[in-house]
Image: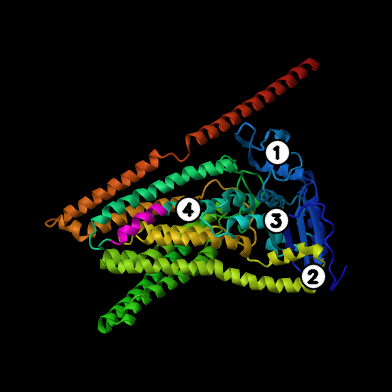
Amino acid sequence: MKRGRSISDPPDLQFKPLVVIELAKDAKAETKEWLIKKIMDKKKDGGCQLLVKSFVISEEDETIFLVGASMKRLLLGAEALGLVKECEDGYMRPFIYNNRKEYKNFIEGDEDFLTMAEYQYIIKHDLDNLRARDEKSIPGYPQAKLYPGKSIFRRLQTSGVIVQVFPLHDKEDLKRLTHRWYRQIRIAFQPIDQIRRYFGDTIGLYFGFLEYFTLALIPMALIGVPYYFFAWEDYDKYVIFATFNLVWSTVILEIWKRYSSAMTYRWGTLIMKREFEEPRPGFHGVLGINPITGREEPTYSSLKRTLRIYLVSVPFVCGCLYLSIYVMKIYFDLENLALEYNQEEQSTFSSLLLFVPSIIYAVVIEIMNRIYKYAATHLTSWENHRLESSYQNHLVLKVLVFNIVNCFSSLFYIAFVMCDLKLLRQSLATLLITSQILNQFVESLLPYWMQKRSNKKIKNKVKSLKIDTEFALLEQIHLEKQMDAYQGTFDDYLELFLLFGYVSLFSCVYPLAAVFAVLNNLTELYSDALKMCRVFKRPFSEPSASIGVWMLAFETMGIIAVITNCTLLGMSPQVNAMFPDSKMDLILTVAAVEHALLALKFILAFVIPDQSYDIQVKVARLEFESMEALKQTQQMKLSSDSVTEDTDAIYS
């Protein structure tokens, strides 16, 4: 075997590497030995009971740990996490190792019973829950303090000993997935179940929602095309279209709830028990005792957090909103200049110049959104929320408030202050199309091009080490560890939320919005698939039963859409002509129609159940079985205690 610069060969792996741990170049030898021992020790001794192999590339002095596990260990981990699997009778139940033969498709020794995403989730969970016992600090790093119950991996990451932890791609599985997913340009449904098996529930749910939202937009697009070619001034024609839009926005969300509940039940996450939420990695404070778990962990005053929110975060958000309104004012000044120039020149160039202010404003909006998201992320981290769910809720609220004002304030101003519906159509079309082009370029095309250039450099670097092709795993690790980490589905859902707003808020003015939304989503399906498979590191799976707080955001936008469309219809000349003598009658009529449509919206939401009858029965049966099992356990315990008491009485 040819050798170049010194490299220690990875030993013949007796297990499939699932997770990579990259350590800092200056990591101490005693720290590495201690960490390997902790990972491999048995559970009863405070370890993870996982398999690990390490190797070092001497040129860069990089230490890489490859982590895997035996099949039995992974199955026991699935039981500990409460993963839900389908039984032979067709019902979903939490996996129990001793009853493993009762589960559908279980074959002893077969690696396909659990998904690859579940394997990596189990390992990540065990590594995150590797906790200190008697150790006072990280060996070799006396300044990195430990206390009983502290997560060792979180301390190693915050101390800079561990650079990153990421799951490895499976080349063969990825090749099959990409071939079926996006390599063939054809009209077909996405392989949602296959995506979920590879990337996990959260990613599977996002692509399921993206596909569903695209299909739900098609009726709006088909109806909007003929409406677009009618006379714009005849707003009576748009009353039916606007009413259909308002009903549509409610029905599609309620049907999605039913669809997603069936999907997540099939995946096992709908009925999966939520484990006790641990403090998020970035949470810090004075060491104290958790009254629920009895473990030592950082504590932080809720009063201090509240003061930070109301004295710093809220004024910051208000200042950003003011800046957004000020930028909008500059946009209208530019719009007036372009309009005056066009009135003077009356040329083709001056007509095209009318679109320039809207395009510039759309670009500025996207830039401001991204800068604000960066600032809001740091500000929310500074607020020091204990739980990840609380952190995400505060971040989503900050970002949504700013994005709604930043993206839609100009449209509301044009519609309800300037009352210029022609300019409203022009601005809406320009904002919609420009934002779509920018998002596709920034989120997918640019990262893909940069990643492709980076991959060429890394491949040349690995080849310079003159490693035999049998160690292609090293090249794969080099490529993947240089990739950017996937930051979650936040930005993807935000983009769909804004798109939903453009379609639903001003449908009676610009019916073609749904057509552009469909075209955007079709390209989004392929571009998002590309970035998941080729641009970013493979993310760790997280069990998800729904799209979470984003459903509330979409429902709120639907309510705002009712008010907006009713007001726009009330402003039309045709409706105004019906009330020539009294504007108060017009206002009361519009308000009555708006209240009636809101009532219809809430009635539809109430009438359409979130789960189908079949799913309700299956979930209820599982709850009944759980209660019966608990009763039997308690009865057995009481019987055992009674026997013990009788035995003690006999011998006393």
Q: In screen coordinates, is 65 left or right of 610?
A: right
Write the residue at 44% across / 65% down.
317
Write the residue at 21% across / 54% down.
587
Mark 4 or 3 closer to N-term? 3
Q: Main secondary structure of the magenta part?
A: helix
Q: Mark 4 points at which residue?
A: 550
Q: In screen coordinates, is 148 left or right of 513?
A: right
78 is within the stretch colored magenta: no
The residue at the far top in this view is: 650
Q: Position of residue 559 (x, y in %)?
A: 36, 51
Query: Label 1 vs label 4: CA separation?
Result: 36 Å
Residue type at the position of mark 2: Asp
Q: In screen coordinates, is 398 left or right of 635?
A: left
Q: Residues within 10 Å of mark 3 (few under 14, many from 20)?
A: few
The residue at the far left in this view is: 581
Q: Where is residue 216 in the image (x, y as percent from the top left)?
A: 43, 51
Q: Residue 106 carries which label?
A: 1
Query: Label 4 vs label 3: CA separation?
Result: 34 Å
Dots 1 and 4: beta carbons under 8 Å? no
Q: Which of 192 and 50 is in front in this view?
A: 192
The answer to whether 164 is drawn above or below residue 268 in the figure is below
Q: Where is residue 546 in the image (x, y as percent from the top left)?
A: 52, 47
All told, the count of numbered labels is: 4
The answer to whether 369 is drawn above or below residue 154 in the figure is below
Secondary structure of the residue carrying tag 1 is loop
Q: Which of 360 and 60 is in front in this view?
A: 360
Secondary structure of the residue carrying tag 2 is loop
Mark 1 or 3 closer to N-term? 1
Dots 2 and 4: beta carbons under 8 Å? no
Write the residue at 69% across / 36% down.
96
